[in-house]
Image (spheres, grey):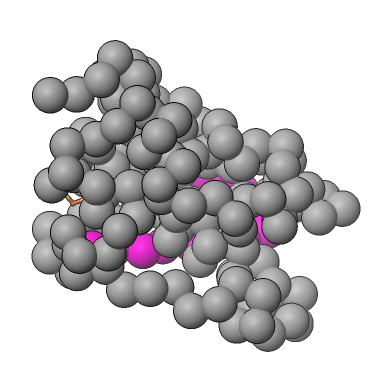
Amino acid sequence: MYTEQVMDHFANPRNVGEIENADGIGEVGNAVCGDIMKMYIKVEDNVITDVKFKTYGCGSAIATSSIATEMIMGKTIEEALSLSNKAVVEALGGLPAHKIHCSVLAEQSIKAAIADYYTRQGIDPAPIVGVIPECEGGHCH
Ligand code: FES
């Protein structure tokens, strides 16, 4: 049911934890399953130099946030903003259909962390980050 990559990132999640003095923190939750994901980013010269996450959630949520942190590490903010939950799922070799919504939390938490980064800079994040869509579970991909 789960690919090797999913099992690997679930069993050995990368970049778990918090960043002290983070430049942006994004916290998102799924209203249906109650899972919560918190993403911390460090930004230097428009580049994400460090990223860590904490997830209170299912195995797929942990695996998707783990691989998502690897996918945005060292990338520009624009590149991180363009990371879709679909790309995260593809990088994991796929997820069961009823677990796709878990990957949306990874995309949303990165966008929320970047929005927080802009807010802290005194910049309105809405025109840059856009509206972070609400996920009601299963209908958001
Ligand atoms: Fe809620 Fe996976 S079941 S994020």
Image quadrant holding the N terminus, namely: top left
Residue 75 in percent (x, y) is at 72, 42
Which is nearer the eye, 23 or 92? 92
Residue 108 in percent (x, y) is at 43, 61
Badge count: 0
Q: Is 126 situated above or below 69? A: below
Q: Quadrant of residue 97?
A: top left
Which is nearer the eye, 108 or 1? 1
Whether residue 91 is in magenta: the answer is: no
Q: Residue at x 35, y 19 (%)?
A: 5
Q: Residue at x 44, y 73 (%)?
A: 132
Q: Is 20 situated above or below 33? A: above
Q: Is 15 situated above or below 109? A: above
Apparent side of residue 105 relative to residue 45 in the rendered image (left or right): left
Q: Residue at x 36, y 38 (%)?
A: 89
Whether residue 21 is in magenta: the answer is: yes
Image quadrant holding the C terminus, namely: bottom left
Residue 61 in percent (x, y) is at 28, 42
Q: Which residues are magenta?
A: 18-30
Apparent side of residue 14 relative to residue 121 in the rendered image (left or right): left
Apparent side of residue 23 relative to residue 121 in the rendered image (left or right): left
Q: Is 30 situated above or below 131? A: above
- The reply to whether residue 54 is in sight is no
Apparent side of residue 99 relative to residue 61 in the rendered image (left or right): left
Residue 57 in percent (x, y) is at 22, 45
Q: Residue at x 35, y 55 (%)?
A: 105
